[in-house]
Amino acid sequence: MEKYETHKHDIIVIGAGGAGLRAAIDASARGASVGLVCKSLLGKAHTVMAEGGVAAALANVDTGDGWKTHFHDTMHGGKLLNNWRMAQIHAQEAPERVEELEHWGALFDRTKEGKINQRAFGGHTWKRLAHIGDRTGLEMIRTLQDRGIHSGMDVYMECTITHLLKDGERISGAFGYWRESGRFVLFQAKAIILATGGIGKSYKVTSNSWEYTGDGHTLAYDAGADLIDMEFVQFHPTGMVWPPSVKGILVTEAVRGEGGILTNREGKRFMEKYDPERMELSTRDIVARSIYTEVLEGRGSPHGGAFLDISHRGGDYVKKKLPSMYHQFKEFAEIDITKEPMEVFPTTHYVMGGVRVDAETTVSTVPGLFAAGEVAGGMHGANRLGGNSLSDLLVFGRRAGQGATEYANKINDNSLSIDDAEIEKAVKEMLEPYENPHGENPYTIHQALQEAMGEYVGVFRTHEKISEGIEELEILKERAVTLKIEGSRMFNPGWHLCKDLKSMLIVSEAIARCALQREESRGAHSRVDFPGYDDEKWGKVNSVISKDNGNMKISTSPLPQMPEELKSIVDGGYK
């Protein structure tokens, strides 16, 4: 331990997006010593990419809204595979968390009466999304960051955590390196909160930025925690199509929420065919499959997508409500969305699966390891509703901070130890690519991985395709055992990719194996060979991934039993 730079805290939060910041704020407020570790720069979190709004039953626009309706919509959006208690807590606590954000300085759009304005979104019964134009996530991060840096936490930027350390069965710390210098760093902690986001860089076409390589999922898996429902990867229906340099960049659902219309190359509004009641405001899984089907059947736009048109709402309205989208298309695609349509196509966006956590405290199956936000599973079931991610990270970020602090307060400072041999093993693993004269290029393997996931485990899946994908992943895993890089550890992106590649291979295998196991179509998981629901066999279980003697084990576990009073809400069609 003496060899390496060491920092000691009660709690280490890995990830400085909305969930990580909210967790760190709460833990600091409760008197814990908190270290916030982020892979990139503070403020660069993926939360800033969330544009459309934060879902909370404030009932400012539609007075009939309430937590029961929000709970009902979330459960049905997730095709009833959600952890019901997480969905209940989320629906009940989201309004308070949004109002709290407002008290901390977030500047929301307003109704004429001065209340927080709310807009419609797919799958939500009422206008429920509180928003700041189409820059909601950016304003949330600004507010949380401002609150966080004044709360006494220590921030460690451009630091990648590569290994979690344990004392017996419980967490005792984390090990990683500074991305700038390549120097190793050790964090001693009683509790760790994972808030690392998603897995999108396992796919070629994604709305996710470079940080999203499944780090938290892999850290938890390697530490012995369960992952659940990894087959459910959300392909956001509307990513940019053209030009190729921006393919996959998100086109917010707010475009449809504000009245955008989807048409095919024949000029037909095709959502009438797939969901005539909700049309463009159907859930993301349905809209994504609909666009994909139109293109597959030869009715796609010139660049292989569908047309999304908001121009009928008028230039002033579009520029006021969707300023980011206006500038994004103007600058990147030379398209004026106030006058002409956008071309869109599904893009890998969000993973519903993640670390299995307790709904009340967010603790995983490993003592001292907590998770919140996209890295945690259960809340969204088989498909996430738009806007629920932002309220999810506020609600469960706070609960993670609370749960981790209560846990840490029970741990004696001197009772935890760190094994030097464990640290040396971590160091050896990280330095191996410098010692392999005949190893593989990590970039080549990453490119092959992305192509394989898009080809074999994409929007539509079959037993044959997924099986081919798993075979390809096994080959890539074998090739990735011996990676080769050159140069120093300073500013070396190839070295960074070696570690990220290991994470992406693990989460990709988890996705593929869960997708092969679930022989039905539910939410974001579409099996062409099993097109319907199988409620009897698959509607009552979570997929479970765990590590068993170094190998990936797949199984199922029954869903938590929902109380009768909540069943009546789910069955009652609340309006």
Image (cartoon, grey):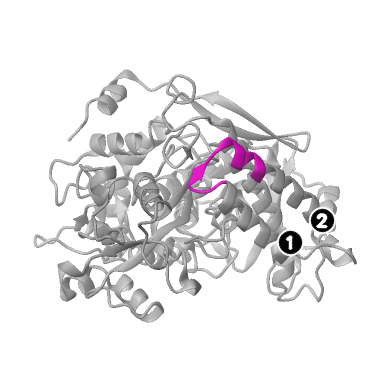
The magenta segment is: 457-469
Rendered image: mark on residue 442: none
Residue matched to label 1: 498
Quarter holding the N terminus is bottom right
- Residue at 49% across / 21% down in the picture? 537
Q: Which of 273/257 is in front?
A: 273
Q: Is residue 465 magenta?
A: yes
Q: Which of 513/377 is in front?
A: 513
Q: Is residue 51 above or below residue 476?
A: below
Residue matched to label 2: 429
Measured as percent of width and height from the top left, residue 518 is found at: 54, 31
Q: Are marks 2 and 1 in contact (CB under 8 Å)?
A: no
Measured as percent of width and height from the top left, residue 419 is found at: 81, 46
Measured as percent of width and height from the top left, residue 139 is found at: 35, 66
- Residue at 65% across / 53% down in the picture? 504
Q: Is residue 145 above or below residue 60?
A: below
The mark lying in front, picked from 2 and 1, is: 1
- The amino acid on which the numbered mark 1 sits, given as a three-letter code, is Cys
